[in-house]
Amino acid sequence: MTRLKLALLNAAHKAVDTQRNFIRELDADVEVFHNPSGEFPDSYNYDGVVVTGSAASVYWDREWIGQLKTWVGGAVEAGLPVLGVCFGHQLLADVLGGRVEDMGEYEIGYRTVTHDGESRLLEGIDESMTVFTTHSDRVAETPPGSTVFAENDYGVHGFRKGRAMGVQFHPEYDMETAELVTNGRKDQLSAGRFQQVLDGIHEDNYTAACEVKQLFDNFLEYVETVKTERLAAD
């Protein structure tokens, strides 16, 4: 069996850290494109697509964000399985007809998210999950015809429409990244909350959050299924 070929659309400004985390978790041949630098695939000749997080907002007027929306919309129309994480989750919602808004605050740190037990993406993962979150935007309205499969008190943490699916949390994070991101938000949090989040970045929480890394294998299994179906239909 040939290895799956994925396009990793890296929307992060700190590209190296994000690339490292996703490459570690995706057991496939991955081609990386750094979107803020203007890098995009020149075709849809991939088995699947992953869109990363970003410090940007999907509603910003930036040329690269518009290009990314156009390319991802084309990938969805081409029938490719697409996984969006954080910013990628929000971008998918926007592209598919949903709405993203500024929350006016941050959700950050190891948090609890629940899922309905019905999503193939989260198969084998406890319905009450520990995950690392960091975002100040949220999907306020999911796309028409989509299904919400994960949420918490801040809102939607997982939705799916067709072969496109997104999660608001960060299953790819290691402890180093969690600490780096938290320190980067120090000026945007109260001193007490900043310290609380930082204190929560420890081995027990990280170990609990590692359970959600299963979603990457689940996504790849789904991509393999779609690939097999497409080959059989040709």
Image (cartoon, grey):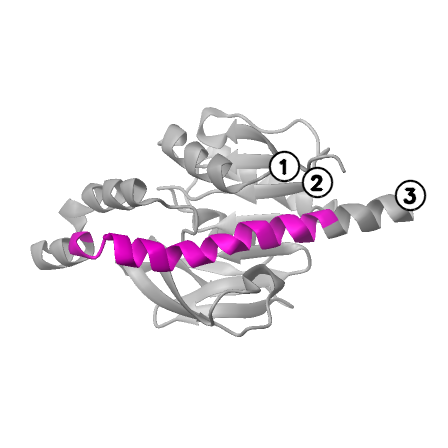
The answer to whether any part of residue 168 appears in the image is: no
Residue drawn at (77%, 45%) of the image: 227
Report the side of 87 relative to 208 (left or right).
right
Instruction: Tell me the kind of residue under disc 1.
Output: Leu
Task: Pick whichever of labels 2 and 3 is earlier in the sequence.
Answer: 2
Front in this rendered view, residue 10 or 125: 125
Mark 3: secondary structure: loop
User: Would you say the magenta stretch is mainly helix, strand or loop?
Assistant: helix
Magenta residues?
A: 198-224
Q: Which residue is mark 1?
A: 6
Q: Which residue is mark 2?
A: 47
Q: Is residue 69 magenta?
A: no
Q: Which residue is mark 3?
A: 234
Q: Residues within 10 Å of mark 2 (few under 14, many from 20)?
A: many
Residue drawn at (53%, 38%) of the image: 66
Report the side of 117 relative to 223 (left or right).
left
Residue 30 picture location, percent across and down:
59, 32
Q: Are marks 1 and 2 in contact (CB under 8 Å)?
A: yes
Instruction: Tell me the kind of residue under disc 2.
Output: Asp
Q: Residue furthest right?
A: 234
Residue 93 picture location, percent across and down:
54, 56
| Distance (Cα) linking label 2 and label 3 | 15 Å
Instruction: Tell me the kind of residue under disc 3.
Output: Asp
